[in-house]
Amino acid sequence: MPQHRALQISEIILEIFRYVSDTSPSRTADLAALARCCRSFKDQALDQLWSEMDDVEALLSLIPPLSESYHPRGSHTVRCYKLDRHMTPCDWVRFDHYARRIFSLTYKPLYDSGNICCAEVFFHLRREKNASLLPRLRTLVWHPPKEIPFTGRRFLEALSVCPSSLTKLHISGGGRYPEDGGWRDDPLFNATLEKLPIFFPQLQSFEASGDLPRCHFDFAGLLLDLRHFDNNHIFSAASTILPEGLRSLSRLPRLETLSLHDVDMDAILLSPAPVGFPSLTRLDICVIGITEFLYILSLLSPEPLKEIFIEDFSANTHTWISAFPHLSPFTSLQTINIVASISSSYEDGDHSIDSCMSILGPLLVLHQLSDVEIKSGGHLQTILLWTDENVRQVACAWPYLRLLKLHFPSVGPSIKSLGFFAEFCPRLRCASISVTLSDPGDLATCQSTHQSNHPLHWLMFGTTVNPPDPPVLAEYLHRLFPSLDALHGMDYFNDVEYTEEVLRLLRLRQLERKMCLGAVATVCVSPLHVPSFAHCGRCRVCLPAPLKCPPNTCHLQRHGSAMRDFRS
């Protein structure tokens, strides 16, 4: 049967193979079958099949002179590979035929069968060939087995497969802390880190994690294309960035994301830092002191920064409160996420911090904020106080708010304060705030707070002091947030039955509203008259405009009988 002419167009074939590669649950088998189907499919199917390698087993199968040996390491067994002889020209032809198609290589063993040691093989092949083994490789993710220490030699062996055009490098030293409690010194590892700009001048993303030797990251500002730098998940507290390294990173013109685990500024006199990081949009720091954080802020250019993430369980939240006023120049900030532990109380010398505005007040000048999350824990001697006016100030200051999670001991605002979020934050979808559940008063006086399409769907409240009856609270919340479908109390074990009942009533109100709107929106008999959405007088759904339909032309009577049947 002759082949259809459309399948002779390489662009169409490539699009089909990409779809198979992205969507097929049996991606490898399907692409292999397509490669064996006909000659016109072979090359492009093989390109897709070998472009992203999730393990090195297939690559090792291209090397004939290999021998295996098994070595016990702790509770696991590591399979080690070794070259028995040199590669012949025919071996190199077969190896290059497939290796030149690899764009991404991931070595990340997850099970005992995946604990293999093979980097030394690639190191010897690189010396034998005197050229890059994977000439089109752009991404290397190298996570050796945790039973094998990550040393400078292992690092060099892993880099032996990479060409100079590599753009993404992620190295990890395993997933456990050293047994002796200390981290290794490895001059070769640090020397290799220093030469990364020479090895890979086009590197755009660098990540380091796990148990690595002691190291200081300083690329001397030479990685001009670097966009992402991350050492946030390194176990070693001795793996740091010195101020010189920060200043060198600040000179990189395209760096967009900076994630830091530790910054060492002991015994170094800080001098005024020049403004740098002209393209940085996200700052993610972990286990870092307030002095180091303020020094980093002094290096930042205020305009492009949009996200700040802080995770520090070694200091209390008040330590970071003192840094909030320094964020005021960064008016383009959209996300602030702070997670910190609290060991004693919110106190500053003789001054006790007893208001939530001590935390949020300095941030109210950042009017572009859309995601705000501040978490703390521990036992406090002081409970922070809110007022309804404080909630109004927050809602007015952050009109673009989409997510608000404030998890620190506080009490004060009434449930009526939620109306400020319904009025001033039309994009809010998720809120966790310690409002006090009390009777919201006469619902007839709350008509102005009704919102017909507010997107909030998740709400967590605080304490319950004389809570209203579930039907009253459900009615009030439904007026504010018609889309609310998840309700939780911070005191989960004491509030679960109450919140479940309120949520059940909320869902009934939403179903009732949908039935009402569906009936009111029915097209009238007159083709030129479409009734507006309005209160039909036969249910509790409150809509803004009165319904004006000619008599006997709409389906209000049918709607009223339907609602009576629904209630019964």
Image: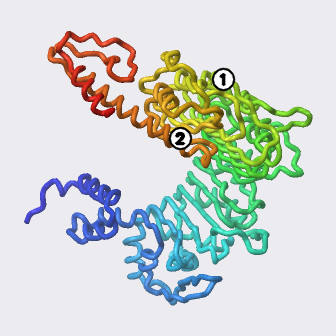
Query: Residue at 52% across / 40% down in the picture?
Result: 487
Q: According to the image, label 1 marks what residue?
A: 388
Query: Residue at 35% across / 62% down in the picture?
Result: 48
Image spot of residue 85 (x, y percent): 50, 89
**What type is the residue that disc 1 sits on?**
Asp
Pick the front one: 431 or 294: 431
- Residue 160 - label: none
Pick the front one: 299 or 339: 339
Relative height, residue 11 to residue 41 (above, below): above
Image spot of residue 378 (x, y percent): 75, 48
Which comes sooner in the sequence, label 1 or label 2? 1
On the rendered image, what quadrant is the C terminus found in? top left
Image spot of residue 355 (x, y percent): 76, 30
Query: Residue at 57% across / 36% down in the picture?
Result: 431
Question: 442 left or right of 436?
Answer: left
Q: Secondary structure at mark 2?
A: helix
The residue lying furthest to the left in this view is: 1
Relative height, residue 32 to residue 196 (above, below): below
Question: 351 left or right of 414?
Answer: right
Pick the front one: 428 or 565: 565
Pick the front one: 278 or 538: 538
Image spot of residue 15 (x, y percent): 28, 53
Relative height, residue 321 to residue 141 (above, below): above
Q: According to the image, label 2 marks what residue?
A: 499
